[in-house]
Amino acid sequence: MKRVQNWLILLLAGVTACNQTSQMERQPYQWPQGVNPPVAEKIPHTRSIHGDTVVDNYFWMIDYFKKGPHSDKVIDYLNAENAYLDEMMKGTEDFQKSLFDELKARIKEKDESVPVFHNGYYYYTRTEDGQQYFKYCRKKGTLDAPEEILADVDEMAKGHAYYSATGFSVSPDNRLMSFGVDTVSRRQYVLYVKNLDTGEIYPEKIENTTGYAVWANDNKTLFYILKNEQTLLTEKVRRHVLHTSVDKDVTVYHEKDNSNYLGISKSKEGNHILIGSGATLSSEYRYIDANNPQSEAKLFAARRKEILYDVTPLEDRFLILTNWDARNFRLMECPLDNTDPSAWKEVIPHREDVLLSDIDVFKGFTVLSERKDGLVQLRIINRVNGEDHYIEFSEPAYDAYTGSNPEYNTRNLRYHYTSLITPNSTYDYDMLERKSELKKQQEVLGGYDQSQYVVERLNVPARDGKRVPVSLVYKKGFKKDGNNPLLLYAYGSYGYSMDAAFSSSRLSLLDRGFAYAIAHIRGGEELGREWYEDGKMMNKKNTFNDFVDCAKYLVEQKYTSPAHLYAKGGSAGGLLIGAVMNQAPELWNGIIANVPFVDVVNTMLDETIPLTTNEYDEWGNPNNEEAYHYIKSYSPYENVEAKNYPHLLVTTGLHDSQVQYFEPAKWVAKLRATKTGDNLILFKTNMEYGHGGASGRFDYLKEVALEYAFLFCLEGITR
């Protein structure tokens, strides 16, 4: 619920946030007049491929990334766009400050995570009043034991505009800890090792890693992943022995296929170090004896085209989650001494209506994460007596997932539950007694009554006959007369399912009359593997069509109207937003695109850009003529036309490693030069951050406040 003091302060100060009308009247914000937007210089660059020639007037904006001759000009343009946004939104500064205070006031500043028990210690994080980061701590044996602060990230981050500490990994003897640090926001982490007995951080540091390392059982050998300096691809798994030169580290595996990602982990039973190499359509594992870290990495099963598998070791066998002859995946097993696919035996068969997405294991139990009818299910299998059951969830739209469960010898499962109206909740589940115990629920300060909000689950007919699930929330009293605002969100790529989760920030929308909807469009995996495959490669346009069809349905059913309908998406979801803005600009009053992937053709043609080669099986390789023309037909940058586009707010980060800054910069410049009408385009580049935005736990709220002020001004909402 909105905090009273915020609007009282504004009222007493005589401040109106967006216009001079009362709260009951809604009139669009009067944007400042006579302020001219930046005009980017046109420097023609010709792209010729497959008999097709395209002139790109803004290709030069890549120069800061490439260290080209126009680098300074790029920075000048980004700064000019930032200055223009500041000027156009100047009248909302007090409103943004009030919104920031409102959003922050809901967050419990002094807080502590639910402790996780592992190898004799309880591990947890805690935050303090006024601090942006956290402290990583542990207690030995009991929660009444003295606290050890393993990493004081609040202190470590001082002096840095951006700071990310991650990958805390404690050695088997509990005396050493490795961790990664990134101070640029490019996800290139420096690995450090800390002696937990003395507090000393060892002088050796390993640069350009993923930020995570795995300990062998000798307590002195670490395995980590090295990235390519330019493409940021994960290329090599290396072995480091403490107190030796990093230059002498041994490469135990080198992935030469630049369409694959690497990952490392340690099995829960403690005897295997796993090296995974995976692309969109295939995967491959190797394993090392954790008790003999100098031994060779053994191949589990050679990669095969369009065969995915994951490996989970038990004491007496391996479990294999695979799509081999099973589109929605099945569970198999094999002996420890024979991992050839010919020795794999089926444990859980393939099901047409259920996606088997993940497994977790404990001594005597297996936990399956499944999806049916678009919703998550957690299935518990007792490996001793063969019995199985499901944990029950009752809301129409929700998210549930297994949490941190590092301990193998336990019958308790840690899982998390949330919904559009239920704050994030942590449970411990006794798998033998079949009972859940709520350990903690996210506190929403200032007063929150979930009974005042309504959740709906819709099934929207798409133009080709498919039914697209939509999760929807609004405050009681919301009238379906077409006169109320609605923000529609989606992602729709990589098989990533966008489940219905709680957000305390979202209450600021709902309490001001907005409805909020998530469209579970194709390209995600909510309805199984087919749902994903029907929204990628040469089926990608289904993703965009689904979103437009959901928007039209919400208008037809009077949840909103084009005068009050808004859309938001980020990263690959920003591609979605750009595509639907080209396809149906008349549907939206305003659009927010965060770090949008909008220059698909040019990015996918340039293998020096981070992640390009990993993405060929998601979008297609435009060096292939058929893929080139299909991608070009929907890529937002390629399809900007002289249209009256909706109001648009675009955000990016200069150091973004996932979607480079120049994609939204080029897109905005081309839109400005091409569009018709007087609707606004605002573009903000954070000059210090990357893909995930600010690193502090409150800094990101300033960006949320900006986005909400943009939406509220378009609706004439004054406070």
Image: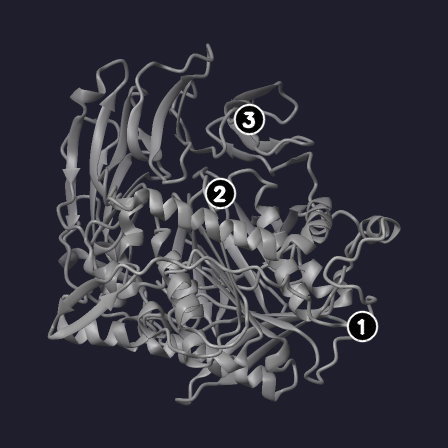
Determine whether 329 is above or below 462 in the image.
above
- Do the numbered discs 1 and 2 sit on residues whose CB atoms are within 8 Å? no
Which numbered disc flags the more N-terminal residue, 3 or 2? 3
Disc 1 is placed on an element classified as loop
Which numbered disc flags the more N-terminal residue, 3 or 1? 1
Is disc 1 surrounded by few (<14), some (14 to 19) or many (20+) residues within 10 Å?
Answer: few
Disc 2 is placed on an element classified as loop
Mark 3 to mark 1: distance in Å? 51 Å
Nearer to us: label 3 or label 2: 3
Residue wearing tag 2: 404
Using the rendered image of the protein, determine whether residue 634 is visible from the camera's viewpoint: yes
Q: Nearer the viewer, residue 413 or 484?
A: 484
Which numbered disc flags the more N-terminal residue, 1 or 2? 1
The quarter of the picture where the N terminus appears is bottom right
Disc 3 is placed on an element classified as strand
Using the rendered image of the protein, determine whether residue 338 is visible from the camera's viewpoint: no
Question: Would you identify the image quadrant in which residue 394 lies?
Answer: bottom right
Determine whether 570 is above or below 246 in the image.
below
Mark 1 to mark 2: distance in Å? 49 Å
Residue at image position (29%, 64%) is: 600
Nearer to us: label 1 or label 2: 1
Residue at image position (44%, 65%) is: 491
Residue wearing tag 3: 137
Residue 2 in the image: state x and y as whole percent. Answer: 78, 56
Residue wearing tag 1: 25
Mark 3 to mark 2: distance in Å? 15 Å
Count of marks, rendered view: 3
